[in-house]
Amino acid sequence: MNICVVGTGYVGLVTGACLADLGNHVICVDIDKEKINKLKKGVIPIYEPGLEGLVKNNRKENRMGFTTDLKEGVKKSTIIFIAVGTPPKENGEADLTYVENVSRQIARYMTSYKLIVEKSTVPVETGEWVKHTVKINNRHKVPFDVASNPEFLREGSAIEDFMHPDRIVIGVESKKARDLLVELYRPLNAPVVITDIKSAEIIKHASNSFLATKISFINAISNICERAGADVEKVAEGMGLDRRIGKGFLNAGAGFGGFCFPKDLSAFIMIAQKLGYDFGLLKEVEKINEAQKRALIKKIEDNLWIVKGKTIGVLGLSFKPNTDDIRFAPSLDIIQALSKEGARIQVFDPQAMEKAKKVLKGVKFCKDSYEAAKGADCLVVVTEWNEFKELDFKKIKKMLKQPLVIDGRNIYDPAVMKKLGFKYICVGRG
Ligand code: NAD
């Protein structure tokens, strides 16, 4: 099939590359000229395991092209995915400016039937607005359909998630739209949920909100464990083995971040409010998450006594491992709060340093974890990268001013750390 993907970010680029790999002809469009120029030269603007090779192969097979010209993309394709950003406004609502813009432009350039698919995460009723926008800008009065096909991939394992999804959700209003999307995804051999557009939109917000709720739930439990002298890791294990609960998203830590959970949660709260329902449960989920970030800062303060003038080594910037994405990462809140208190921060992350340099000022960016530990009054773990799990703590002990490790992700064994002579502070363990 001939596909156009508008928005070449984490979702758009992965979607484009995977659909090309399934044998389709894909044209990826973005307004960011620098991004498109890089992609044309084979440079991938984000870090996502396996993506570079996938794009390279499909470029070689002539199945994948890049342009800033949406008109070209619309002309050459039947299915157009909208995968632009839907960032939060100050009040938490989703900012749908980019979605509206793209919908209007697609309508103006259409000269034959198009299926316009929402891939971006959008509040319920956006499909109605997209349809309305396309209709009033449809100069040539060409037939079109709008569909919702929310994306569930996770950064860090995006290709695997796209190619082997737990389910594919398709929200449609016509048989033609349904047949096109079912055919497109047929090679993935995944369960398909076919529904109306509004239900599909809600499935995405409800799923992310549910997962965020699970994280905040276990974080709340971690507070009980800390106070009672219990071990949240064991509690999570004991809960997670119950198949009705499941093991996933039961890791206590320094709170969730990223471009999805925080914004989707607030957008869902806002859309519920607009529809006349006060989603108090989700407000509490947000509150627990904020408190969890503050709790890590408090542990640092309590163990350093005076933060001003101290050197703090920080391991991890990305909001989770295997990505360079720092959008809404807890590391940013934590580092900024400690810097404000007068601490000197020296940080290392395997992939997210370049992006972080643009937003974190007055911070020392180190070449590795050991440099981040050198001369520091404490070492703080904020992201659970695998390489942090394998550090030589005998070496680190010699480099730190005092043997103090504050682990916001519970990646070390408290007994081992104690034996090595560290004061080891973690989350919800004793
Ligand atoms: P992103 O910021 O990485 O990418 C968005 C891209 O859209 C940018 O490259 C931007 O330049 C481009 N863009 C903006 N306006 C444009 C326009 N008018 N024409 C062409 N391109 C335009 O964002 P992302 O992380 O890929 O997220 C995109 C959407 O997918 C969001 O709604 C997000 O919630 C959703 N989503 C994200 C993830 C994830 O893990 N990142 C997972 C599932 C769903």
Image (cartoon, helix red, strand yellow):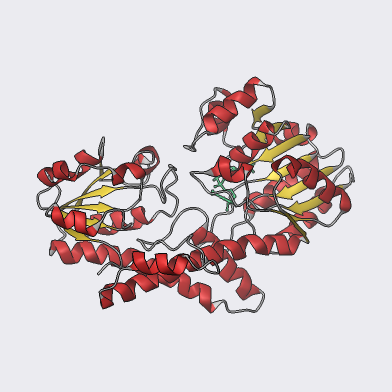
Q: Choose between 32 and 56: the one closer to the eye.
A: 56
Q: Quadrant of the C terminus?
A: bottom left
Depicted 34 relative to depicted 102: above or below: above
On screen, residue 56 versus residue 139, left or right, reads left
Q: Residue at x 49, y 59 (%)?
A: 248
On screen, residue 213 versus residue 30, left or right, reads left
Residue 133 position within the rendered picture, expressed as x and y whole percent measured from the top left: 77, 54
Q: Residue at x 35, y 50 (%)?
A: 384
Residue 423 position within the rendered picture, expressed as x and y whole percent measured from the top left: 15, 59
Tally the marks.
Answer: 0
Q: Quadrant of residue 273?
A: bottom right
Depicted 299 relative to depicted 144: above or below: below
Residue 378 position within the rendered picture, expressed as x and y whole percent measured from the top left: 17, 53
Q: Quadrant of the N terminus?
A: top right
The reply to whether residue 179 is visible in this rendering is yes
Q: Choose between 108 and 159: the one closer to the eye.
A: 159
Looking at the image, the residue that sits furthest to the top is 60
Q: Residue at x 76, y 43 (%)?
A: 186
Q: Quadrant of residue 193?
A: bottom right
Residue 199 position within the rendered picture, expressed as x and y whole percent measured from the top left: 72, 64
The reply to whether residue 107 is visible in this rendering is no
Q: Choose between 74 and 415: the one closer to the eye.
A: 415
On screen, residue 283 versus residue 28, left or right, reads left
